[in-house]
Image (cartoon, rainbow, N blue to C red):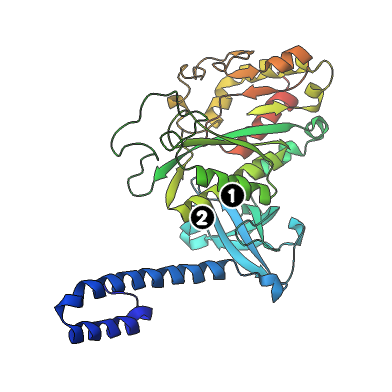
Amino acid sequence: MDPPSSCLTITTHWCTHIQESGEENTQTATESNFVSWSSCEEGKMSLLSDLINLNLSEVTEKTIVEYIWVGGSGMDLRSKARTLSGPVTDPSQLPKWNYDGSSTGQAPGEDSEVILYPQAIFPDPFRRGNHILVMCDAYTPAGEPIPTNKRYNAAKIFNHPEVVAEEPWYGIEQEYTLLQKDVKWPLGWPVGGFPGPQGPYYCGIGADKAFGRDIVDAHYKACLYAGINISGINGEVMPGQWEFQVGPSVGISAADQVWVARYILERITEIAGVVVSFNPKPIQYKSMREDGGYEVIKKAIHKLGLRHKEHIAAYGEGNERRLTGRHETADINTFLWGVANRGASIRVGRDTEKAGKGYFEDRRPASNMDPYIVTSMIAETTILWKP
């Protein structure tokens, strides 16, 4: 392999030195060549890092805005950036933008323009300064939501006066697995093999139990920087599997925050050279938080049971592989609720039962669920639906 061009002058000098000094110095020259080439690459990386972290506020008030949206699969995220003349503090200050929907599986080639409507802004933990991330939803040029725009219907439900009055709080647990990039095998697993039995990995520490913690902590801090109400992280029962929690957050903002937290995680794993997989929850309303709230919780759970099949159909693809009735999951075909029962469809905490008010936990959604669909569907069933 040839060394980088910026090292050619030094390399040519060493080649001359080898010819003049004879074979006895060949090994020394070769070693020096390697060290200098390595130093050259380190210098390049240092310069690249300096450029990435340039403080633009010293020279301009312009702001970089990263527009984020959900792609054609309903699970993939896309983004692109543009420059605005100054700082932005509200989504209403941002212009709409467009993208080629035929390249994301969201529009035909002969009519490919899709329009992005900015909906929620977050400080950008990658560019920092005044730069922001903005979560968008997508519409046709005529202003109709495209089929993969699940935020549109969610917003209608959360803007309903009865739902607004309940101030629904959501706490969402997001599980994910970190995979080796080239073989798509979980971190900490022998390639082509399997790890030891469950037990030491859940909330474990140590190089033989926790894999990818630097990514997890970087994501934790980046989410806090972005203003996401991330409330915790922990290692899960499988090597390479982790979880973060978002909430409590009110209404549709919970779903916006989960999507942006996923985006930040994918950006961090991109930098780290690993792949994140989302393949195969506490809910609280104002009346549930007040005295007598436990009866409200039980009525809500009853309605969720009546629409169990509809909810399962919307709670993520491949959920039948997870909801087996084993490993602290409910059977996908059976609705069951209980106090402190992690094998139930709906779990109520001991503290809620004791206080007579609090929250319940829907344990059915898969890690690849769309938070817009799930949070709004729970609100629609438990608040608006009259069986």
- Which residue is found at the position 77% from the left and 57% from the top? 90
* Residue 188 on image: x %, y %: 38, 38
Side (left or right) of 22 relative to 283: left
Q: Quadrant of the image for the N terminus?
A: bottom left
Side (left or right) of 211 relative to 53: left
Residue 370's quadrant in the figure?
top right
Residue 83's quadrant in the figure?
bottom right
Side (left or right) of 239 relative to 349: left
277 to 345, vertically: above or below: below
350 to 177, vertically: above or below: above
Side (left or right) of 75 relative to 120: left
Please give the residue where the numbered disc 1 appears in the rendered image. Answer: 146
Give how far apart the Cα atoms at labels 1 and 2 are: 9 Å
What's the amino acid at mark 1? Ile
Q: Secondary structure at mark 2?
A: loop
Please give the residue where the numbered disc 2 appears in the rendered image. Answer: 107
Residue 326 visible somewhere in the drawing: yes
**Towards the viewer: 298 or 229:** 229
* Residue 367 on image: x %, y %: 52, 34
- Which residue is found at the position 54% from the left and 16% from the top? 343
How busy is the neighbourhood of tag 2: few (under 14 within 10 Å), some, or many (20 plus)? some
**Towards the viewer: 14 or 188:** 14
* Residue 139 on image: x %, y %: 62, 53
- Which residue is found at the position 56% from the left and 29% from the top? 365
* Residue 149 on image: x %, y %: 60, 46
> Along the polypeptide, which appears first: circle 1 or circle 2?
2
**Towards the viewer: 170 or 93:** 170
Per the rendering, the mark at residue 313 is: none
What's the amino acid at mark 2? Ala
Residue 150 visible somewhere in the drawing: no
82 to 377, vertically: above or below: below
Q: Secondary structure at mark 1?
A: loop
